[in-house]
Image (cartoon, rainbow, N blue to C red):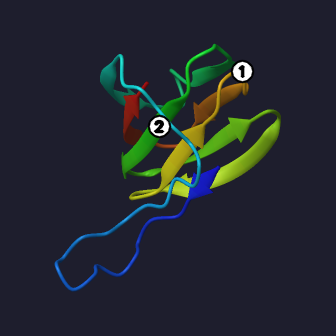
Amino acid sequence: MIVKGKVTPDERGRCPYTLGKSLVAVHHFVTRVTTPHNPFKPHKHEQPELWFILEGDAVVTLDGAEHTVEAEDLIVIEPWVEHGLRTERQVKWICLG
């Protein structure tokens, strides 16, 4: 699931991201920089993950479907969904999983 960013802050200055019924237990927190020379190749595993795009734009692949993402977008990855990320420039992002 892709949750687009650039939302308008609420009255307290927060920008909420709705996760629906997704539940992610955090076992790792990783910051990443991906470039055309080091794409994050498609793979899958049993734990869910959250990816948050800090800077740049990229293409995220979820079970073969491609989605364009940009800064402030949140990607919700369910268990066993094949996922990867590539960019034509540079993208900085966070992985929680």
Instruction: Tell me the tag on residue 69.
Output: none
User: Is residue 87 in view?
Assistant: no
Along the line of sight, the residue nearer the viewer: 72 or 96: 96
Q: Is residue 60 above or below residue 83?
A: below
Q: Is residue 24 above or below residue 8?
A: above
Instruction: Tell me the tag on residue 50.
Output: 2
**Which residue does the image show at 63% across and 28% down from the upper left?**
84
Spot occupied by residue 8 in the image (x, y as percentages of width and height): 35, 81
Q: Secondary structure at mark 1?
A: loop
**Which residue does the image show at 36% across and 25% down from the upper left?**
26
**What is the quadrant of the C terminus in the image?**
top left
Spot occupied by residue 11 in the image (x, y as percentages of width and height): 21, 86
Residue under numbered circle 1: 80
The Cα atoms of the two marked residues, 1 and 2, are separated by 14 Å
Q: Secondary structure at mark 2?
A: strand
Q: Is residue 44 above or below residue 70?
A: above
Which amino acid, mark 1? Trp
Q: Residue furthest right?
A: 64
**Which residue does the image show at 48% across and 43% down from the upper left?**
89
Q: Residue furthest left?
A: 12
Lower position in the chain sequence, tag 1 or tag 2: 2
Count up the numbered dots. Answer: 2
Q: Is residue 97 above or below residue 16?
A: above
